[in-house]
Image: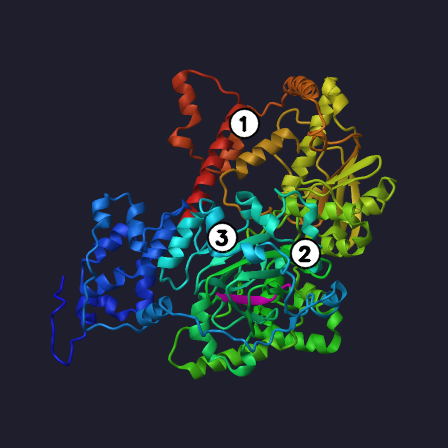
Amino acid sequence: MENSHESQSLHLKDRRVDALGNFNLLPDELICAILDYLTPRDIARLACVSSVMYIFCNEEPLWMSLCLKKVNGPLPYKGSWKKTTLHLENLPNKYIDYCRKPLQFDGFHSFFLYKRLYRCHSTLDGFSFDDGNVERQNVLSKEQFDREYDRKKPVLLTGLAECWPARTNWTIDKLLLKYGDTAFKISQRTAGKISMKFKDYVSYMNEQHDEDPLYIFDHKFGESAPGLLEDYNVPQIFQEDFFDVLDRDSRPPFRWLIIGPERSGASWHVDPALTSAWNTLLCGRKRWALYPPGRVPLGVTVHVNDEDGDVNIDTPSSLQWWLDYYPLLADEDKPIECTQLPGETIFVPSGWWHCVLNLETTVAVTQNFVNPRNFEFVCLDMAPGFQHKGVCRVGLLAVDGGCLMNMEKNMSCDKDNFNNSDLTRKEKRVKILRSQESENHEETANAASRRYNLWKHGFSYDINYLTMFLDREKDHYTSPWSSGNCIGPREMREWLSRLWVGKPRMRELIWKGACLAINADKWLECLGKICSFHNLPFPNDDEKLPVGTGSNPVYVMDEYVVKIFVEGGLEASILGLGTELEFYNTLCEVDSPLKNYIPTVLASGILHLENGSFEIDSWDGKKVPDVLAKCNLIPETGKGDVFPFGIRSKKLFEYRKAGLPESGPDSSAGSNSIWPYLITKRCKGKIYAELRDELSWEDVLNLASFLGEQLQNLHSLPYPSLGNSSLSVVEQKKEFSFANGMDINVACNELDIHIPAEWEIFVRTLSQKKKDVSSRLNKWYTI
């Protein structure tokens, strides 16, 4: 390593070139980003290469990042991030405890490292905006709040928490005394789930000098510390929450305990699913910055995945934004701002961007909610597709320039006729280019002004306006579900169903949301055609929404149940119906006792669009309908096959699909306009989930015995032979390899065992699925 006393002359030699070699050509920010991909042991070795590498490799922000990537669970902070990381590496204590004074080197300077060091040691005592432009209100009725603020603009409310026990009990000292050994969840930009005992977290707050300190952001604090729930109550104007109809295990996270030191906070974001939120501060001060919907802040990059609509936001830390980006803004481009004081509650409307910086140690509680004013926006955000999600967050920046010109013409002529088909995109991802740190502040400020002008270009956070950007070709049941959605697709359908039953006076609103989120109007139209064809009564108002948590639209009427098959695309759907028809036919042929407990099949068929109008072909599963033959869906049939799309074809289809990359539903011609369906007699009674808590132990045992008998009846049914010829047909189209590199035929020959073809297909399918899952996990890990 080079001597730290290398030069004592007035003109110090810049050691960067010799110490970094070719890395000297890279900006310091990029060097730090590269180091972030290395392991702690590699960083330790690299620190010995040269003096400048020693400086880069001993930066606390680097060791903080390395540590948070490694930890998953309780975090034992050891006074510095380097010591904590070495502790997690299970090094002997004598190496961890040995800490000599860091080496000092002259002849090197880095503006990037200096700014980061400055942010890490910034104090924010005088960093407030007391003359903020967020309105403050003392007493506000529910009617006044709905009329003037909800879905319109933020407001600071005083007096809502004055009677809460939390107003006096939620100080750091009192919380430490009562909950010192309680572990709370920590929020950080890492995939791991980190927690700390509160006493350890308080020690960390007192010792740290981090730019973006760890932040308690715990949505399960009511489980780990239930006494905290007794210290506050939801203000009356925020009590209406549509998610209340869901069970606690089904509803998304909605309330958080928030505790953080000076410099911590929440970087720029829009609340999940476009929900609204309230935040009550119990101690400390918070500085807020807010932008209305569609106005993306300077320095923020928004990515919307064109496949599933998943939204990812790249943003600087709260402190970095205030120090580096805020000064670049012209007055007209600055956000709405305020300093929140203890006892005040701030309301953040749906879709608003906001950034929060803790000016001192703070304790707060916040909740997100869905009410009649934002319900349609929440449903819109759950709808399949991607462009509408981008527009909701970044406005017309989600649309390319050429489309904006077309949009101006369309809107000036007839805004109501403007639709998503006019909005073709040159790029598949919404990207708002992030402004790079530059000394040319004037150029960056001009870019911000151009963004502001583009945002003002006709954007409106209105539900009718935003729905124009929906992709009407996308369907809830067949499109990929965004991993960023706050609930899953089944929970979404259950939520709408419970609202439909539990809030009959709001059905007009709920129906609008269901049409946005799950295409309820489309499937009701299909149901109407089916009912008309079979002379069934049209569903009444209680029966308009599909029920259940399955992956196909199912309608339960007074005497009938209609199931429309859509899951997996056309081929999978037709095989699903064909298999059910073959199963029911087998029950009747062998006169199985099981048929007495299976819903009676009343009718089945295929609904399809022909020249813009609906047509229906009755189908009992025993031939290939013309509408499927036109789509080239003609399966390989075996000798004596009565059901061409029955169990045999379905198993071969699963075998063929197993191990293939997941690319969504199949793309068979006409798959978006052909829907198999099944009508059965409705079974009376209640489902087990509704009776579980009411049954006696004797009833449970009797039910288990009954189910065991029916399972035996199921396994005694004749299974259609697949035959080795079926297997060879599939293998001609695809080359297979097997688990552990062993072919099942080789194994059977060695053991002199004959394996039926259906068993072989089953084993091979599982083997391929195993490989598929492994490859996906490896892919996600590398990403």
- For badge 3, the amino acid type reads Lys
Residue 602: which disc?
none
640 displayed left or right of 50: right
Q: Residue at x 55, y 43 (%)?
A: 223
Q: Position of residue 273 (x, y in %)?
A: 61, 57
Quadrant of image for the N terminus: bottom left
Question: Residue tagged by mark 1?
Answer: 725
* Secondary structure under the numbered disc 3 in the rendered image: helix
Q: Position of residue 198 (x, y in %)?
A: 44, 49
Q: Residues within 10 Å of mark 1 (few under 14, many from 20)?
A: few
Q: Earlier in the sequence, mark 2 or mark 1?
A: 2
Q: Do the numbered discs 3 and 1 sit on residues whose CB atoms are within 8 Å? A: no
Question: Residue tagged by mark 3?
Answer: 174
Above or below for 305 versus 90: below
Label 2 vs label 1: CA separation? 57 Å
Question: Residue tagged by mark 2?
Answer: 370
Label 3 vs label 1: CA separation? 75 Å
Camera-side residue: 531 or 133?
Answer: 133
